[in-house]
């Protein structure tokens, strides 16, 4: 009973907060995150009334499965952007920008934090500094996708942004594995080629293979169903199964084998959308079905934010350096790589700002980094930066997309008004709607 009350409180709180921030023209994502903070264990949860918000951090952590499912559907949806016709036009630019901005961000954050270590050795160690540099490369796809959806943003910047955010996960995984391997070697005095190179490459290759298989199976099975409701149910089933399989971990011959949830689901969406001729219709219906799930995801993300770290001056100092250098890296990296690949001026100018949000992937990396001697500092700094980026990042993404001319007034029209008689007639008479 208590869990159901907490979920209903999270949904209601998120929806009400979205109305509160509407006059300020803030994205709904920001409203959901603020709602999560308010009903979390550090605000309303302190009252101690069961079901009225989350009373402890453990109660929020117990609902982690919801966050994993939401990330799976987000990644599956982003996979829809990797259509062959788009890759022919923007594939080279997306890959170049995706790799360059991540590497430049890592290098700049490394310079900033190692410099801080040289000035104040007691504040942060070199292993933690270079680990944070790699974590800085990660960008949160969820907040970006939600802003794009809410305002129905469209254009070359939006298309490149979604491609870059998707590529960013694979690049960030490699950078983190290499940096964390070096950091561990600095502490223990021994480097492992297996953990630095072999295991991250295996994770990327196996994740892509598993996702491709899931997307192909989804297409093959959906051929036997003709109603859109059954196809929707089958698609949701596929994503649920894919998320579950991506959580598997095992060891073969001393080599740790694991999967990236985002990469697996992204590849599943990519393969499905490129081989299925009615995929766009299915994706539209999945978008409608997942709306409440995404609200829960962001409210829970807000409830997870630990406000007690704001009382630690050392965390605030390291966090400030991290945020400044990461922001500079994302912007300059995107600007330089866009200019080098001859992107449009509006893309070159605004893409970097849209890459600032950071959340789940970075927190997962920080959890691994706790193995370092001062790993608790790494996690606290990442928690602080996530608090800042998640509250400010969506608004900056909206601002950049608006300045680039890809969010227009009609993008905020109610869907009931947008779906006029012609569109409803078209959907109602689609040949795939036959039972």
Image: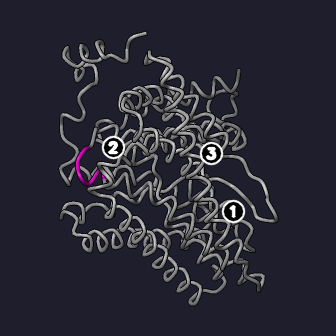
Residue 209 in view of the camera: yes
Determine the secondary structure under disc 2: helix
* 343 displayed left or right of 311: left
Q: Which residue is mark 2?
A: 148
Name which quarter of the figure residue 409 lies in: top left
Q: What's the residue at 28%, 13% (across, down)?
A: 429
In primary-sequence order, the first of circles 2 and 1 is 2
* Of 275 and 77, the residue lying toward us: 275
Give residue 26's mark. none
- Label 1 to label 3, Cα distance in Å? 25 Å
Give residue 42's mark. 3
Q: What's the residue at 26%, 56% (across, down)?
A: 89
In primary-sequence order, the first of circles 1 and 3 is 3
Q: Position of residue 134 (x, y in %)?
A: 55, 71
Q: What's the residue at 54%, 25% (across, down)?
A: 234
Neighbor class of circle 2 (other Cα within 10 Å; few <14, some 14-19, many 20+) is many
Residue 299 in view of the camera: no
CB within 8 Å, label 2 to label 1: no
Determine the secondary structure under disc 3: loop
Neighbor class of circle 3 (other Cα within 10 Å; few <14, some 14-19, many 20+) is many
- Label 2 to label 1, Cα distance in Å? 31 Å
Q: How many numbered discs sit on the rendered protein?
A: 3
Question: What stretch of residues is rendered in magenta?
Answer: 154-159
Neighbor class of circle 1 (other Cα within 10 Å; few <14, some 14-19, many 20+) is some
Q: Quadrant of the N terminus?
A: top right
- Label 2 to label 3, Cα distance in Å? 30 Å
* Foreground tag (1 vs 3): 1
Depicted 168 relative to depicted 245: above or below: below
Q: Which residue is mark 1?
A: 368
Name which quarter of the figure residue 5 lies in: top right
* Of 206 and 297, the residue lying toward us: 206
Q: Position of residue 337 (x, y in %)?
A: 31, 72
């Amino acid at each position: 009973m208590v869990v159901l009350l907490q979920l209903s409180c999270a949904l209601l709180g998120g929806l009400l907060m979205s109305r509160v921030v509407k006059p300020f023209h803030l994205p709904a994502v920001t409203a959901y995150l603020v709602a999560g903070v308010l009903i979390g264990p550090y605000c309303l949860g302190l009252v101690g009334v069961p079901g009225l918000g989350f009373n402890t951090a453990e109660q929020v952590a117990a609902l982690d499965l919801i966050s994993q499912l939401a990330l799976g559907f987000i990644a599956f949806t982003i996979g829809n952007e990797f259509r062959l016709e788009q890759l022919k036009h923007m594939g080279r630019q997306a890959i170049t920008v995706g790799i360059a901005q991540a590497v430049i961000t890592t290098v700049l954050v490394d310079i900033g934090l190692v410099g801080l270590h040289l000035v104040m050795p007691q504040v942060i160690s070199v292993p933690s500094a270079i680990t944070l540099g790699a974590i800085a490369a990660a960008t949160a796809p969820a907040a970006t996708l939600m802003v794009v959806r809410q305002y129905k943003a469209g254009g070359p910047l939006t298309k490149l942004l979604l491609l870059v955010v998707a590529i960013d996960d694979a690049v960030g995984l490699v950078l983190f594995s290499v940096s964390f391997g070096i950091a561990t070697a600095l502490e223990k005095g021994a480097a492992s080629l297996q953990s630095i190179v072999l295991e991250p490459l295996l994770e990327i290759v196996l994740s892509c293979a598993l996702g491709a298989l899931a997307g192909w199976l989804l297409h093959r099975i959906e051929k036997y169903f003709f109603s859109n409701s059954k196809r929707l149910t089958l698609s949701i089933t596929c994503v649920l199964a894919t998320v579950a399989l991506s959580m598997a971990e095992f060891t073969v011959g001393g080599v740790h084998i694991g999967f990236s949830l985002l990469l697996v689901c992204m590849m599943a969406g990519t393969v499905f959308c490129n081989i299925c001729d009615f995929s766009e219709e299915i994706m539209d219906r999945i978008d409608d079905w997942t709306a409440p799930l995404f609200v829960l995801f962001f409210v829970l993300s807000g409830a997870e934010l630990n406000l007690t770290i704001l009382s630690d001056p050392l965390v605030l100092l390291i966090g400030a350096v991290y945020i400044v250098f990461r922001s500079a890296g994302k912007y300059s990296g995107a600007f330089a790589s866009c200019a080098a690949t001859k992107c449009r001026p509006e893309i070159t100018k605004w893409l970097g700002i849209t890459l600032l949000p950071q959340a789940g992937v970075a927190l997962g990396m920080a959890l691994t980094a706790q193995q370092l001697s001062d790993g608790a500092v790494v996690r606290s700094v990442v928690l602080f930066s996530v608090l800042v980026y998640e509250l400010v990042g969506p608004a900056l993404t909206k601002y950049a997309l608006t300045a680039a001319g890809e969010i227009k007034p009609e993008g905020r029209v109610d869907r009931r008004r947008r779906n006029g008689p012609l569109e409803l007639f078209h959907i109602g008479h689609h040949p795939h709607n036959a039972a």
